[in-house]
Amino acid sequence: MSRRGLTGLSSWNRRLVAVGVFAWCLITTFPLYWVVVTAFKTPPGVVGGPTYIPFVDFTPTLQPFIDLYQGVRGEFFRTFLNSTIVGLSAAAIATAIGAMAAYALVRFEFKVRFGAGLIFFLLALGAYLLFNNTLGFTRPQALLLAFPIALVAAIIANRLPLPGPILGNEDILFWFVSQRMFPPIVTAFALYLLYSEIGRLGFQLVDSYLGLTLCYVAFSLPIVVWLMRDFFEAIPIEVEEAAMVDNVPSWRIFLGIVVPMSMNGLLATFMITLAFVWNEFLFALFLTNSRWQTLPILVAGQNSQRGDEWWAISAAALVAIVPMMIMAGLLSRMMRSGLLLGAIK
């Protein structure tokens, strides 16, 4: 079989490739087109049979969008504001923390003893049972006391020559990425139970800005670490070594040299993280009731006793996806201009 590239194909084969690409574009863009045209239909225009072309098959109307504006379909603007505030906050915090973690994994060598991790698990469980069952502390109080004690003990134990394997940077990175392998339903249910227990202490996390933002930060960190690690590896280390010769502190090297050089990668990672948070449904379903409900929950709830009202669902979905379409357009322009070279593999 010939290994020639696309430029080496005959004119007939290039036409076949062009036809295949065009057909694939039609397949991928048709759902978006269907959402757009459905958002401008009346109820009879939706239930009366398929119509495809505005002003030809049907007369467009703005009534679904008027219903959104007037709050007939729920508090859309408050929900939109919730998604914007939580999404921007979670993406910014996750990008900042994840970038520091990724830089540390690239430039510093870590050694975590498996025995220290085992000590953390056993001590955290044992201390929790001791505080809760023996000393009479409530479950939230036992959790808040047991985990710091276990963490300090594990850090001290990691400095001792414990038997067993020693985990390095690659193992730590795999541990970060492996957090996304858990079924989301398990994590969401566990978080709901944890937030409920903390709420008994007076710290309301269910249906709150802080609770949802912290959840999304933890949810996004593996993606940020994975993406930014590849970008930091592409930055030449000689620049940092020159600063070290002048006794520049590590934190100034990171903030003054590494961050400006990796700004394009940070921006791309921020936008990708924001897209994940913006479209997330399951955690928002478990951890919010009404006050901090996000757009995916509102869009999914656009129905009535008569069934799914697709004109309302399409109008809400169209407004919800427009910001992400703008973000995708900005990201694609940056990628075409080569500004993100090395940021994403």
Image: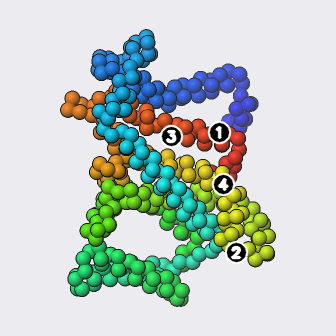
Counting other residues with Cα less than 10 Å from the Cα at mark 1, is it few (<14), some (14-19), or many (20 or more)? few
Q: Earlier in the sequence, mark 4 or mark 2?
A: 2
Q: CA distance from mark 2 to mark 3?
A: 39 Å
User: What residue sits 49% from the left and 66% below the top?
Assistant: 175
Q: Nearer the viewer, residue 180 or 324?
A: 324
Give the CA distance from mark 1 to mark 2.
36 Å
Of mark 4 and mark 3, the one earlier in the sequence is 4
Query: What mark, if any, has residue 249 been given in the picture?
Result: 2
Image coordinates for residue 140, horizontal then vertical, percent: 29, 73
Residue in the image at 52% along x and 88% along y:
160
Q: Earlier in the sequence, mark 4 or mark 1?
A: 4
Q: Nearer the viewer, residue 328 or 323?
A: 323
The kind of residue tagged 2 is Pro
Specify the quadrant of the image occupied by residue 180. Answer: bottom left
Q: Which mark is residue 64?
A: none
Residue ID for mark 4:
263
Return the x and y of residue 42 as percentages of the image width and height.
33, 20
Identify the residue under disc 1.
Answer: 333
Asked if the residues shown at circle 1 and circle 2 are in contact, with their CB atoms under 8 angstroms apart, the answer is no
User: Residue type at mark 4?
Assistant: Met
Report which residue position mark 3 lands on.
324
Q: Secondary structure at mark 1?
A: helix
